[in-house]
Amino acid sequence: MKTHPAARRNLIFVFTLLLLMLPATPLMAGMLDTQSLIHSADSAAERAALVERLGSDDVQTALIGLGVDPAAAQARVDRLTDAEVADLQERIDGLPAGAGVIEVIVVVFVMFVILDALGITNVFSFVHSR
């Protein structure tokens, strides 16, 4: 197939123009230090642990109870940065299981004693209202 010289010249011009319009991204090569490799491995392990917790039945039930779609929660965990995953994992690990139960019971008891003392409720017989 024989092409017209003007068509060939126009085609070469268009391809040259397209190549010049492509953004040139500089390549940056650098040394990888051991600390960054360990950090990336740690963040991958923390993300896997978070995903595993999110997949447990009790967490799924709690999410559904709060009106959160477990798939949406999973997608949100996938979008977290490594620093956010580490922070979330640290907070979860810092919470002891069942913590706060005794404090809640004491606060509710004190609240009922105060309400009994004010005469609003009559829960305890040993508290006399004024």
Image: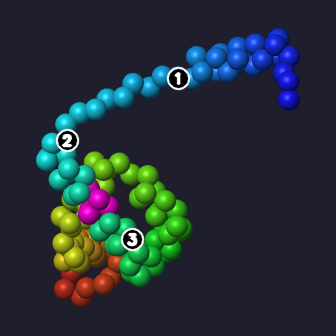
Disc 1 is placed on an element classified as loop
Mark 3 and mark 1 lie on one chain; the one further toward the N terminus is 1
Location of residue 120 in the rendering, given as x and y in whole percent from the top left corner: 36, 73
Task: Give the quarter of the image for residue 15.
Answer: top right
Mark 2 and mark 3 lie on one chain; the one further toward the N terminus is 2
For disc 3, the neighbor class at 10 Å (few under 14, some 14 to 19, many from 20) is some
For disc 1, the neighbor class at 10 Å (few under 14, some 14 to 19, many from 20) is few
Residue flagged by tag 2: what amino acid is it?
Leu
The CA distance from mark 3 to mark 1 is 41 Å
Residue flagged by tag 1: what amino acid is it?
Pro
On residue 32, the disc is 2
Depth order, front residue of 16/60: 16
User: In screen coordinates, is 55 left or right of 29?
Assistant: right
Residue 45 among those drawn in magenta: yes
* Residue 119 appears in view: yes
Q: Residue at x 18, y 72 (%)?
A: 96
Location of residue 89 in the rendering, given as x and y in whole percent from the top left corner: 26, 61
